[in-house]
Image (cartoon, rainbow, N blue to C red):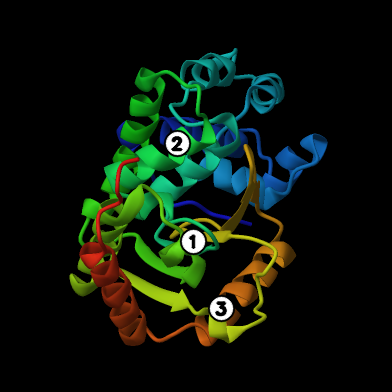
């Protein structure tokens, strides 16, 4: 059973719903498990709603109002905060990321969103949607850079990224953009704000060859993992699955270059991008 700490409802809309859900549940004399059972969700899931870690979807809100006699409170407020600047498949993960105490991420092909520069992110979004309006791309990039502002806090969350060497070698936006992107990562690492490792090609087979992986830990809720594919993603809270994903990340850390060796490689690749000859226009 997850017992969340008291939250400041003014700090986060989900915190308001979480506080009210906890108070209403306890007033009704129900455990987290008992409240979640008719919805076929675990007590831990209810605890994550109460802690503000998970987003409350409308079908849950309607049920809580009926079960707890809250006269439409949850449905009204759930509808009011439902809009997100992130795609539907990523919105809940982004919200969880914003309150995480630690984020551990393995990336196979591109720099993680929290570490992207404006030029790099622009190229990524444009490649994903070649016919999008410039205004749409600009809004997407702005949202991604706003996400990265959580790194403005000097200590929280801990961000530990393991980058496949393919991330360094895939030219996103050309040499100058790649040099800037890699220097951004090394600067954050040298400021002791993040920990970064590179998983080199020479490591051969490794524990997460099937794809990228993100694990988020929280002070007052169980950890979550997030897996993502083209225009889809899934936030997972099953303890056995999250434990397995945590083991996979630990194995990746053990296989990757050390943080010091990784910085040296990042520096060398960035320098190569900086010194390459400009592409000739045809």
Cα gap from disc 2 to disc 1, whole angstroms:
28 Å
Residue linked to disc 3: 252
Count how many numbered circles sit on residues in the image: 3
Say if mark 3 contacts mark 2, CB within 8 Å: no
Q: Residue furthest front?
A: 282
Cα gap from disc 3 to disc 2, whole angstroms:
28 Å
Reading the chain from its start, which is encountered first: label 3 or label 2? 2
Is residue 158 at least partly visible in the picture?
yes
Cα gap from disc 1 to disc 3, whole angstroms:
18 Å
**Disc 3 on helix, strand or loop?**
helix
**Disc 2 on helix, strand or loop?**
helix
Q: What residue sits 32% from the left and 72% below the top?
A: 269
Query: Which quadrant: the N terminus?
Result: bottom right
Instruction: Look at the picture and state if 279 lies above or below 265.
Output: above
Reading the chain from its start, which is encountered first: label 2 or label 1? 2
Residue linked to disc 2: 125
Q: What residue sits 41% from the left and 49% below the top?
A: 113
Q: On the picture, is 103 further left or further right than 262?
A: right
Nearer the observer: mark 3 or 2; the answer is: 2
Residue linked to disc 1: 217
**Disc 1 on helix, strand or loop?**
strand
């Amino acid at each position: 059973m997850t017992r969340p700490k008291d939250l400041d409802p003014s700090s986060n809309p989900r915190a308001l719903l979480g506080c009210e859900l906890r108070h209403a549940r306890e007033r009704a004399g129900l455990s987290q498990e008992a409240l979640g059972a008719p919805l076929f969700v675990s007590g831990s899931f209810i605890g994550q709603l109460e802690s503000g870690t998970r987003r409350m979807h409308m079908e849950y809100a309607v049920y809580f109002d009926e079960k707890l006699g809250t006269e439409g409170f949850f449905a009204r407020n759930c509808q009011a905060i439902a809009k997100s600047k992130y795609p539907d498949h990523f919105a809940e993960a982004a919200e969880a990321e914003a309150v995480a105490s630690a984020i551990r991420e393995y990336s196979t092909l591109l720099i993680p969103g929290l570490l992207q520069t404006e030029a790099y992110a622009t190229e990524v979004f444009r490649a994903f949607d070649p016919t999008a309006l410039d205004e749409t791309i600009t809004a997407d990039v702005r949202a991604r850079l706003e996400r990265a502002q959580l790194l403005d806090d000097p200590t929280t969350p801990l961000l530990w990224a393991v980058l496949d060497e393919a991330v360094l070698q895939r030219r996103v936006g050309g040499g100058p953009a790649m040099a800037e992107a890699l220097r951004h990562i090394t600067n954050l690492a040298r400021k002791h704000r993040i920990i970064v490792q590179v998983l080199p090609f020479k490591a051969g087979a490794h524990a997460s060859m099937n794809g990228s992986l993100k694990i988020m830990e929280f002070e007052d809720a169980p950890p979550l993992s997030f897996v993502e594919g083209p225009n889809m993603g899934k936030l997972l809270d099953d303890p056995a699955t999250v434990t397995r994903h945590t083991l996979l990340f630990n194995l990746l850390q053990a296989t990757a270059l050390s943080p010091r060796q990784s910085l040296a490689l990042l520096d060398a690749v960035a320098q190569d991008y900086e010194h390459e000859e400009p592409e000739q226009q045809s």
